[in-house]
Protein backbone atom coordinates (compact mmCIF):
# COMPACT_ATOMS: atom_id res chain seq x y z
CA UNK A 1 0.00 0.00 0.00
CA UNK A 2 2.87 2.36 0.76
CA UNK A 3 4.45 1.77 -2.64
CA UNK A 4 1.11 2.43 -4.33
CA UNK A 5 0.68 5.76 -2.56
CA UNK A 6 4.31 6.75 -3.13
CA UNK A 7 4.05 6.13 -6.87
CA UNK A 8 0.77 8.02 -6.97
CA UNK A 9 2.43 10.99 -5.27
CA UNK A 10 5.41 10.87 -7.66
CA UNK A 11 3.09 10.81 -10.68
CA UNK A 12 1.16 13.79 -9.32
CA UNK A 13 4.30 15.82 -8.64
CA UNK A 14 5.79 15.05 -12.06
CA UNK A 15 2.52 16.00 -13.72
CA UNK A 16 2.32 19.32 -11.90
CA UNK A 17 5.93 20.20 -12.68
CA UNK A 18 5.42 19.16 -16.30
CA UNK A 19 2.41 21.45 -16.67
CA UNK A 20 3.84 24.46 -14.84
CA UNK A 21 7.45 24.47 -16.05
CA UNK A 22 7.99 25.73 -19.55
CA UNK A 23 9.83 23.23 -21.74
CA UNK A 24 9.40 20.29 -19.33
CA UNK A 25 6.28 18.80 -20.89
CA UNK A 26 8.02 15.43 -21.04
CA UNK A 27 7.70 15.27 -17.24
CA UNK A 28 3.92 15.32 -17.67
CA UNK A 29 4.13 12.31 -19.98
CA UNK A 30 6.44 10.48 -17.56
CA UNK A 31 3.97 11.24 -14.77
CA UNK A 32 1.11 9.81 -16.83
CA UNK A 33 3.11 6.63 -17.54
CA UNK A 34 3.94 6.25 -13.83
CA UNK A 35 0.27 6.79 -12.94
CA UNK A 36 -0.91 4.14 -15.39
CA UNK A 37 1.73 1.67 -14.18
CA UNK A 38 0.73 2.39 -10.58
CA UNK A 39 -2.95 1.80 -11.29
CA UNK A 40 -2.20 -1.50 -13.04
CA UNK A 41 0.05 -2.56 -10.15
CA UNK A 42 -2.63 -1.61 -7.63
CA UNK A 43 -5.37 -3.41 -9.53
CA UNK A 44 -3.33 -6.61 -9.76
CA UNK A 45 -2.36 -6.46 -6.11
CA UNK A 46 -5.85 -5.75 -4.79
CA UNK A 47 -7.41 -8.41 -7.01
CA UNK A 48 -5.07 -11.08 -5.65
CA UNK A 49 -5.20 -9.77 -2.08
CA UNK A 50 -8.22 -11.80 -0.94
CA UNK A 51 -6.75 -15.21 -1.60
CA UNK A 52 -4.36 -16.96 0.74
CA UNK A 53 -1.96 -19.61 -0.49
CA UNK A 54 -2.78 -23.17 0.57
CA UNK A 55 -0.65 -24.94 3.14
Image (cartoon, rainbow, N blue to C red):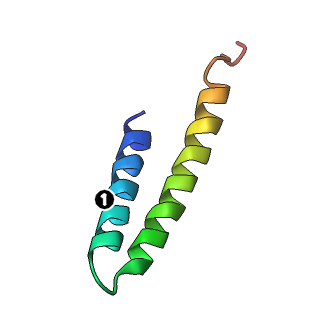
Q: Is mark 1 on a helix, strand or loop?
A: helix
Answer left or right for 48 relative to 41: right
In the picture, which quadrant includes the C terminus? top right
Q: Where is residue 38 in the image (x, y as percent from the top left)?
A: 52, 49
Quadrant placement of the N terminus: top left
Q: Identify which residue, 10 or 25, lies in the foreground.
A: 25
Decide which of 49, 27 is in the foreground and name it.
Answer: 27
| Residue wearing tag 1 | 13
Query: Dot 1, crowdedness within 10 Å: few (<14), some or many (≥20)?
Result: some
- Number of numbered markers: 1
Residue 10 picture quarter: bottom left
Lateral position of residue 14 relative to residue 36, left or right: left
Q: Which residue is drawn at 35% across and 72% down?
A: 18
Give percent across and percent down for residue 25. 40, 79
Instruction: State the residue at coordinates (36%, 55%).
Output: 12
List x then y, in percent, for residue 40. Answer: 61, 46
* Nearest the eye: 11 or 2: 11
Give residue 33's position: percent from left, percent from top: 53, 63
Q: Eyeballing the image, is 3 above or below 53?
A: below
Is 1 placed left or right of 45 in the picture? left
Residue at the image position 44 percent from the left and 41 percent from the top = 4
Against 19, residue 12 (above or below) is above
**Residue under the point 69% across and 19% down:** 53
Amino acid sequence: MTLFLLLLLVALILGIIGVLAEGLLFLLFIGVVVLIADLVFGALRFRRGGRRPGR
